[in-house]
Amino acid sequence: MVREIINSGNPILRTVSKEVSRITPEIHILIKDMIDTLKASPIKGVGLAAPQVGVNLRVVIILLKDTKSENIIPLINPQIVSFRGEEEEYEGCLCLPRLYGKVKRHQEVKLKALNEKGEPFVMDLKGLSARVIQHEIDHLDGILFMDRMEDPTQLYYEDLPNLFPTYK
Ligand code: ZN
């Protein structure tokens, strides 16, 4: 089921989300709904965090793609355990439609999380995927991308869709 994506200004986006202590059927439904919501989004997205659909739980999904395939991976209680490098690039967010700004992120991150069965796994991400997961984990901590802009006056509105890579 597609859920509504909430807008910035909603206090849910500024709340630190709770860890998932047990993988219940509700968590499975939440993940499925988040995937439906990401797929249904008019702007092609590469990730979504539970607070964006109004749920303050530490659950995110990210779209991983290579030349052959596209997979949406759920991550429960994701945590960055190490990182390398730094890169500044444009970001946007579905909760802040058409706003963009340059944000510094780590180029590579190693993270640990639980899968849908509650089993721990580790994952190495770099480039765009690394940027996306840092953006999504920020959502779990009530942080929006403009909070991380070195110069917030450079936040700008752009009415042309897909001019820059879109992050959710
Ligand atoms: Zn976002």
Image (cartoon, rainbow, N blue to C red):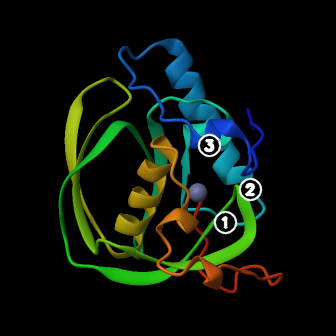
Q: Is mark 1 within 8 Å of ligand 1?
A: no
Q: Position of residue 141 (x, y in %)?
A: 45, 43
Which amino acid type corresponds to the residue marked 1 in the rendered image?
Lys
| Tally of numbered discs | 3
Disc 3 is placed on an element classified as helix
- In the rendered structure, find residue 166 and report the number of the disc placed on it: none
Disc 1 is placed on an element classified as loop
Q: Residues within 10 Å of mark 1 (few under 14, many from 20)?
A: some
Which amino acid type corresponds to the residue marked 3 in the rendered image?
Leu
Q: Residue at x 37, y 14 (%)?
A: 22
The CA span between labels 2 and 1 is: 6 Å
Query: Who is closer to the viewer here, 24 or 143?
Result: 143
Q: Check the image and report above or below for 165 versus 36.
A: below
Q: Check the image and report above or below for 125 versus 61.
A: below
The CA span between labels 1 and 3 is: 21 Å
Q: Residue at x 74, y 56 (%)?
A: 41
Q: Residue at x 24, y 70 (%)?
A: 108
- In the rendered structure, find residue 41 and report the number of the disc placed on it: 2
Image quarter hosting the N terminus: top right
**Residue 68 in which image quadrant:** bottom left
The CA span between labels 3 and 2 is: 19 Å
**Residue 23 in which image quadrant:** top left
Residue depth check, mark 3 versus mark 2: number of the one nearer the observer: 3
Residue at numbered disc 1: 44
Q: Check the image and report above or below for 135 versus 57.
A: below
Residue at numbered disc 3: 13
Q: Position of residue 101 (x, y in %)?
A: 59, 78
Query: Who is closer to the viewer here, 45 or 49?
Result: 49
Query: Who is closer to the viewer here, 132 or 18?
Result: 18
